[in-house]
Every structure is written in structure tokens, then in C-alpha cells.
Image (cartoon, rainbow, N blue to C red):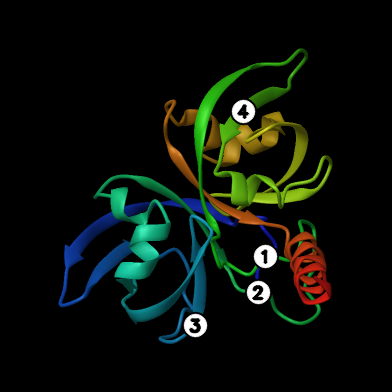
Amino acid sequence: MFTGIIERTVRVIGAAQGPGFVRLTIANVWPDVVDGESIAVNGVCLTVGEHSPTEIGFDVVKETLGLTNLSLLAGGDVVHVERSLRVGDRLSGHFVQGHVDGTAKLFSQKAAGGDEWRLTLECTPDLARLLVPKGSVTLDGVSLTIAAIHGNQFEVALIPTTLRITALGKRDAGWPFNLEVDILTRTIIGTLDRREKSSS
């Protein structure tokens, strides 16, 4: 479980093809990482496969590669990282599982007055129906609030702090952000869908 409040950005060291998986290696910025722990990389919950004082390696399977933007990463790219939530930690964002639902492509970005920056993204209809105005959403691991919804497109507002400490405002149009919808919204809509199907 995570919060969507990323700890920092780090560089990808490399992505090497393995038998049925890709070994993704990133820079290690923590002195107490252990094998087997969970770390969210661009919002995707990954398990530490091996580590050294300078590197952390994860084995990413084909299903994850097909559902996320991790397959696009190469050495030198910047990713958002967050270690898993501990009991008693502050929950400054929202509950994030690290189980990405799909991707949302960046449609456009622009200044929205004052210090606010707006991103407009587009996702598939099945994901769009799980979004609600003022609800939470996670993009590449960053907890954000949905500012507006227009069909399959939605907007999020980025404050200067978010622009400074993340790579969200540096992506080109067409970049597929890893999208995780709010777990509470997904649960409610899923429950109502099942109830409707059983009653019919």
C-alpha cells in the first residue's frame, strides 16, 4: 500500500531482457532497502529482486509491461519512486495499491492562471467511467485530484511544488501515464455493477 506522495525521482540505470521478464534497474537512494520489499516505480508496485548500495533491481513480467509505461523506460530516464506505507505513517495523499489499471495518454498541457498548470489526459471508456470530479487519481505514482471530466478526457491541476519535484510537467503529448483509479470509487462502482447484473 502506498500514498501517492512520491519520495523523489531517480534515474533508470537500465532495462535488460530476461527469460519472460525485464530486469529494471534504478539508482538506490536508500541505505536500508531489503530484497523482497515493495517499491512503487512510476506508480507500479514492484518487488526488490536484488540490491546494492548504488542499484535496485526489479523483475517486471510481461503482463505488467503490457499494462504500464515501464516497457518504454531506458537508461537515463527519470522515474517516481515511493516505498510502501508503514503503520503509523501520515497519509497525505490517498490509498494507492500500486496495481495500475491502465494508461492515460497526455492530450495537452497548459498554464491555467496564477501558478496552476493543467494536464488534459485521455483514457479508455472503461477507465473513464471509474473517474469522478474532485475524486482522487494516481498518475505515474503521483496522487492528484481530478479537476474536470469531459467524456473520456479528464484534467488534473499541478501546483508549483508538484511541478518541481515530479516529472509530470515534463512529458510530451502522447506519453502514456500509468493510471490507477481511486480504490474506493472502483469498489463502489464494481459492487453496483455486480448487483445490477445479479438483479437482471
The foreground one among 42 and 52 is 42
Give above or below for 144 relative to 105. Answer: below
Looking at the image, tell me whether mark 3 or mark 1 is earlier in sequence order: 3
Say whether marks 1 and 2 touch (CB < 8 Å): yes
| Disc assigned to residue 19 | none
The residue singled out by tag 4 in the image is 119
Which of these two is toward me, 39 or 188?
A: 188
Camera-near label (4 vs 2) is 4
Secondary structure category for the residue under label 3 = loop
Q: Earlier in the sequence, mark 2 or mark 3?
A: 2
How far apart marks 1 and 2 lie (CA) works out to 6 Å
**Disc 1 or 4, which lies upstream in sequence?**
1
Residue placed under numbered mark 1 in the picture: 96
Q: Separation of disc 4 and disc 2 at Cα?
A: 26 Å
Look at discs 4 and 3 and give the one toward the viewer: 4
Tag of residue 37: 3
Label 1 residue SS: loop
The residue type indicated by label 1 comes to Val
